[in-house]
Image (cartoon, grey):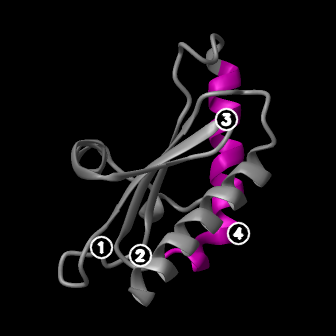
Amino acid sequence: MLPKRHRADRKILERVFSSGKFVATGGISLKFLIDPPEKSPKNGPKICFVAPKSSVKKATERNALRRTGYVEMEKRLSFLPRGFCGAFVIENPKIDLKKEIDAILRKIKTEKHEKNSD
């Protein structure tokens, strides 16, 4: 499971949802921002998973989805830049979370390379 130092708190989430960028795939979306080095957290990227009650009715299922997301992101933390803050919103509980996370990370990486090449 993702260590607590890499999980986003409410302050970070408010900033992300108010001024972050948005990337989505079939059943999951990511709202994120990348802080400049002087503002970036000392402990690296900050991530959270949100499973809204409108998508998943049972709390046990919402918690299981979030836990699965944290386990999958722990394996992929090295792909995220320092200062990355993001919230994954799980809109469809029947998705393959691993594949969707990989697809979103590829989109972010592609955007980053396109931006750097301009």
Report the residue that reaches farthest toward the front. 118
> Residue 51 lies in what quarter of the image?
top right
- Asked if residue 63 is positioned above or below residue 83 in the image, the reply reads above
Region of the chain picked out in magenta, as a range: 60-80
Residue at the image point whose x is 59% and y is 63% from the top: 107
Q: Mark 2 points at which residue?
A: 44
Identify residue type, mark 4.
Lys
Do residues under tags 2 and 1 come within 8 Å of each other at their CB atoms? yes
Vertical comparison of 46 with 90: above or below:
below
Q: Distance between the residues labelled 4 and 3?
A: 20 Å
CB contact under 8 Å: marks 2 and 3: no
Residue for badge 3: 27
Judged by depth in the image, the label closer to the viewer, 4 or 3, is 3
Is the Cβ of the residue at disc 2 closer than 8 Å to that at disc 4? Answer: no
Q: Distance between the residues labelled 2 and 3?
A: 26 Å
Which type of secondary structure does the marked residue at label 3 adopt?
Answer: loop
